[in-house]
Amino acid sequence: MERYDIAVIGTGPAGLEAAITAKVRNKSVLLIGGKGSSDKVAKAHTIQNYLGLPNVSGEDMAKAFLDHATSMGVEITEDKVNAVYSMGKYFAIQCHGGDYEASSVIVAAGMTTMKPFPGEMEFLGRGVSYCATCDAALYKGKTAIIVAYGAEDEEEAEFLAERADKVYYLPQYEYTGSLGGNIEVTCDIKPMSIDYKDGVASLTTDKDTYTADGIFILRQQIAPSQLVPGLTMDGNHVAVDRQMATNIKGLFACGDITGTPYQYIKAAGEGNVAALSAVSYLTELKKATE
């Protein structure tokens, strides 16, 4: 498996700037995120305090960010990260579309306000998962529950249903799809808590309790504490120093995920610092192995 110098998670201002800076420093970069810059940027109204881009619309700013990244040879790997594990001298990155390795990681995934359901963290990896396509092979002849937050999750449900006997699909968005067969769709239902006992997973909602062999929670964003085991938090934000370093050696964070102010120019600046810090870390790592 190819091992990248730096993996960057997130394609907002912080992530794109980190990837660009790493490219300038001649490092191999894996940039993981959605296609294009973040919706938060593209949908913004006129922005007046970004140096060099006065009175720019969010749409134009997003295009400028992407054009700059593309001109530097930065490519976006469209995928969703499930977990990042420190393996000592490198990091293992588990995604929906496959697994990757990198010597250093920069987390620039933005801020999520979603909180885990009661029981979610306790049973993560034991009845609870974040990737239906990753674990589909384990559900042959079994039953599964999917809590979905976007229409793109319907494809995961269909993939899982090809292997599982039964899939309960609980959309937390305005569902207009046409899932059928062994997929049972129930709308307007709110998950409340999760339990797992004697090999049976149960999801209690505001209307009923569902039981299955496992539960998949397909959020668009995963809380940092869930994304990286052992990561030190400062409230809902990742705790970092002035070099954007976290408590995990070789792992850096930048942008909204590190705290206020939630400003594009602050995010981009932190992306630059995080990339430079990652480059310095790689230099130290190389010296230590020589």
Image: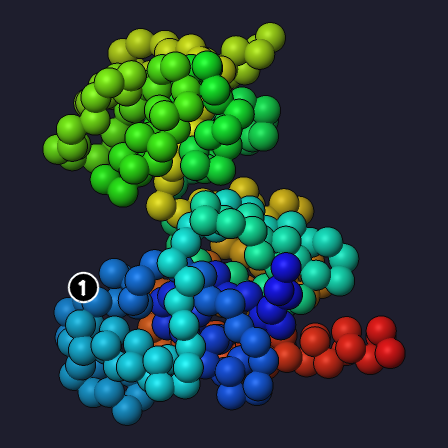
Q: Residue at x 37, y 72 (%)?
A: 13
Amino acid type assigned to the residue bearing label 1 in the image: Lys
Query: Is residue 285 positioned above or below 249 on the image?
Result: below
Furthest residue to the bottom? 52
Q: Position of residue 272 (x, y in %)?
A: 50, 80
Left or right, residue 202 beside residue 157: right
Query: Is residue 10 positioned above or below 149 on the image?
Result: below
In depth, the one of 201 and 43 nearer the eye is: 201
In depth, the one of 264 and 152 nearer the eye is: 152
Q: Residue at x 42, y 15 (%)?
A: 143
Q: Which residue is mark 1?
A: 43
User: Which quadrant holds the C terminus?
Assistant: bottom right
Q: Is residue 150 visible?
A: no
Q: Position of residue 89 (x, y in %)?
A: 75, 62
Q: Residue at x 37, y 40 (%)?
A: 219
Residue 180 position by quadrant: top left
Q: Position of residue 190 (x, y in %)?
A: 29, 23
Q: Residue at x 21, y 35 (%)?
A: 173
Judging from the image, what secondary structure is the residue with disc 1 in? loop
Q: Is residue 60 visible?
A: yes
Query: Is residue 225 positioned above or below 131 on the image?
Result: below
Left or right, residue 79 beside residue 57: right
Total marks drawn? 1
